[in-house]
Amino acid sequence: MSRGSGTGMSTGMSTATAPAVTPASGFDVRAAGALPGPEVLTRLGTAEGGLSAQEAARRLSRYGTNTVSSHRARPWQVLWHQLRSPLLGLLMAAVVASYFVGERSDALIIGVIVLLSVGLGFFNEYRAEKAAEALHSQIRHEAVVFRDGGSRRVPVAELVPGDVVELRLGDIVPADLRLLSVNELECDESVLTGESMPADKNVSPVPEGTALADLTGCALMGSVVHAGSGRGVVVSTGARAEFGRIAAGLGTRRADTGFQTGLRRFSLLLVQVAAALTVSIFVINVVLHRPIIDALLFSLAIAVGITPQLLPAVVSTSLAAGSRQMARRKVLVKRLVCIEDLGDVDVLFTDKTGTLTEGRISYMRSRGPDGSPSDRALAWGLLCNEAERENGVVVGGNPLDAALWESPAARHVDVGAYRRLAELPFDHERRMASVLVAGRDGGRLLITKGAPEAVLDRCADVPESARKVLDAEFAAGNRVVAVATRPAGPLTAITPADERDLDLAGFLVFLDAPKRGAAEALNRLAALGITVKIVTGDNPAVAAKVCQDLGLAVGGILTGAELDRLDDRELAGALATTTVFARVSPEHKARIVRVQRRADIDVAFLGDGVNDALALHAADVGISVDSATDVAKDSADVILLEKDLHVLADGVMEGRRIFANTMKYVLMGTSSNFGNMFSAAGASLFLPFLPMLPSQILLNNLLYDTSQLAIPTDEVDPEQLARPARWDIRFIRRFMLCFGPISSVFDFATFGIMLWVFHAGAPEFRTGWFVESLATQTLVLFAIRTRRIPFFSSHPSLPLLLASLGVIAVGAVLPVTPFAAALGFTPLPFGFFAALVVMVVCYLGLVEIGKRLFYGVPHAPVTAPPRDLARRHARRRAARFSTAARHPGTPRQV
């Protein structure tokens, strides 16, 4: 038996043959709402059966795609991101000035080095942008549209005015629609109107000038089908839709994630340090009567030198490589920076179906109120059923309803004697569905099916034996649906008020077995420091039994009714000891997440249903699956291509690996750069010449940064993956002030050797310090990258090792190349390299001692930074209506 069309549902499927009429100026959803549905169809040159594919293609060419934003990588934007540094602008201005005052060769060399640095950053960041674009192209949203006399799924971006669209529970309305037929349709329009309560919909026109929130005859782009179903004709798409206008006003900049907030704070720290050093060095050199241009160039080069110029490139390369790795592990992220946030998760709230259980629900048996087998309960369950069937095959709908039809028992039950007259769809507040059927004798019967507690509350009398049967099934971990009926008399339509005075027919029992491998996945998450809590609409006894079977200790259980009796302060106290939240509503789930986040804990929520959307929005990281409802996928930051906690654990580990490698660059760069620049400032006090030329400082920085582009390939120690890690500016500052002076000690040792051992002049001094500083700050990475003993208990990746050794070799060879004179270098004596080897060994040994002392002092834990989620709903929804350049392969519908 296929699902009925419901009250008020039109069945006309004729394809429009009239020529398309261009909508009059101002014919938007407000104007359409004031007109009867048939007149809107006429004005749009369409019919209830929709457009032909040919006409739809013509209109798509004319009106454009149904999008409000684009995810294309734009080279000029990436280039501007590289050029917008104020320090870089000042340096280029000083280069131009020095060129015109006669120092043309130095100006030219500095200009070339700066251009190489910008080019390197541009190449890597643009490649990361292309990776993000390719990632976005794998995500495609679709809508059910009537074309050529039949229904089909088409990309949301290809909808055009005149298309007739089907709306079902959980759908996101794909464009502004004038409704043609509805069946108990309600839409959540909070993303547009701010109104938290769903809006009831009908097909009646409204007066002209009606406010957006009162357009009851229209469904608005970006709103969510909260209950019921309907059908409507598209009147506005893209930026012409009401939500499109709102999305356009949001601008292109999204709210920062925790990772981006940390980057911004880190950049501010560097600006402060660079400003102090630049000003002091410039003043020192001017006081010592050195040429102002030379002093300015030198101080600016120092400022650029202390700034990790390729940090954006290193971060972008890490995230791009991570996104590809996560995609191979069946994890898609909507934004690259979400990878970092996934690694920060402390607590995971998840449903049990499909994550802790197999998610393949099978019908087991039907039992009467006394516990005996009951084909009668099964027959009523097949009649009160929302599964979609074509030619006797289930093609969609509620998994429980589908399992009923697919069971062998259903083949022996004849329901052909009944005709369905009306239906009242399931919703998450009532937790029931009802149908009105008529028998061959004309008698009418109301059948209600749903959560046992909800159905039993509406029964006139419930025998004690029925409650014992129910408790026994719950204790066994089975899912149970109750079925009840009552004579319907003269009813022709049904409302929730009619679900009363019911007679209990029995129970339908289903099995959803614990998932193989779920226990191991839970252990992996626990080893990663992630606390897993179950949030489910199922019975608490069933949820507890599943947890027990999988070895997940149940610290406590709270039901939705108990949650309602707690204020937020009491709930916050209960969260620490509660593992299972059962029989909870969508609002309960969102409240649990919000209260948990207030404790400075990073929260992830994994859900795939309509009732999970609020919690997905409220979480720091919303996680869904590719088989989820539209609204769940839209609300999520991360999409799992397989609903498996192992896949999620892989994603968390990848996020932490990327963060750990990014921090290696930050800690090494800030400490060694700070030490080198501090050494330069000190040398300026007693040397009669600049300790290193501006071009040499910039070249040193360029070579050093180039070697660090291999950091994203590096291995990460297991202990660095065991717990979430966050940006801690205090920690970075302490690290810089501890290890920077260690670097300076060996810089001053180099100064002494060059001046008093080799009696070096300016060229030899500069060359010696260039080679030593490049070697020490590059090799120190192998000590800083791990808290273990490098090379013995922690091994770097081969690309990182080769890149680092290659750069050191380039620095050592440069003084004997044809470019040496132009760069101000001169060949060094062999004895210097022997001294250099000794200094490097001593330096790395002292760093190891510093590590033991530094990490031996306990550091205060850092809390998660506050995150502004106020505008995230609208931005996430806007991302649904966006385009990306097409890439080879079939886009994935998620």
Image: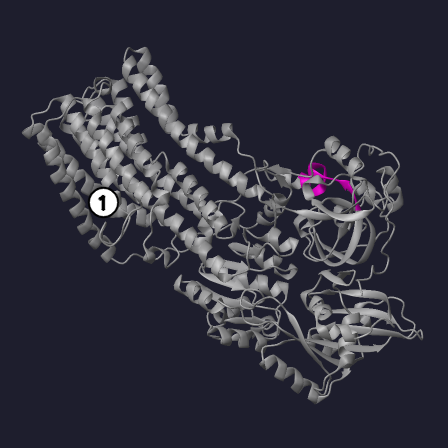
For residue 146, say whether it is visible: yes
Q: Between residue 770 and residue 559, name the one nearer to us.
A: 770
**To which quarter of the image does residue 5 belong?**
bottom right
Q: In the drawing, does residue 554 fall left or right of residue 378?
A: left
Up the image or down, 670 lies above or below 496; here it is above
Q: Between residue 600 and residue 512, name the one nearer to us.
A: 512
Answer few, some or many: residues within 10 Å of disc 1's Cα (few below 14, many 20 plus, some between 14 and 19): many
Q: Residue 246: give x, y in percent of width and height.
A: 66, 41
Q: Residue 839: give x, y in percent of width and height.
A: 13, 39
Up the image or down, 351 lies above or below 653; here it is below
Q: In the drawing, does residue 235 fall left or right of residue 156?
A: right
The residue depicted at 54 percent of the width and 39 percent of the height is: 133
For residue 674, say whether it is visible: no
Q: What is the quadrant of the N terminus in the image?
A: bottom right
| Magenta residue check for 593 | no
Q: What amino acid type should be assigned to the residue bearing mark 1?
A: Phe
Q: Residue 593: give x, y in percent of width and height.
A: 54, 61
Chosen colour scheme: one colour
Most distant residue in the left direction: 757
| Magenta residue check for 244 | yes
Q: In the drawing, does residue 679 fall left or right of residue 88?
A: left
Q: How many marks?
A: 1
Q: Between residue 866 and residue 221, name the one nearer to us.
A: 221
**To which quarter of the image does residue 762 belong?**
top left
Residue beneath disc 1: 739
Please report the bounds of the magenta region as a residue range: 233-245
**To which quarter of the image does residue 608 belong?**
bottom right
Question: Helix, strand, or loop for circle 1?
Answer: helix
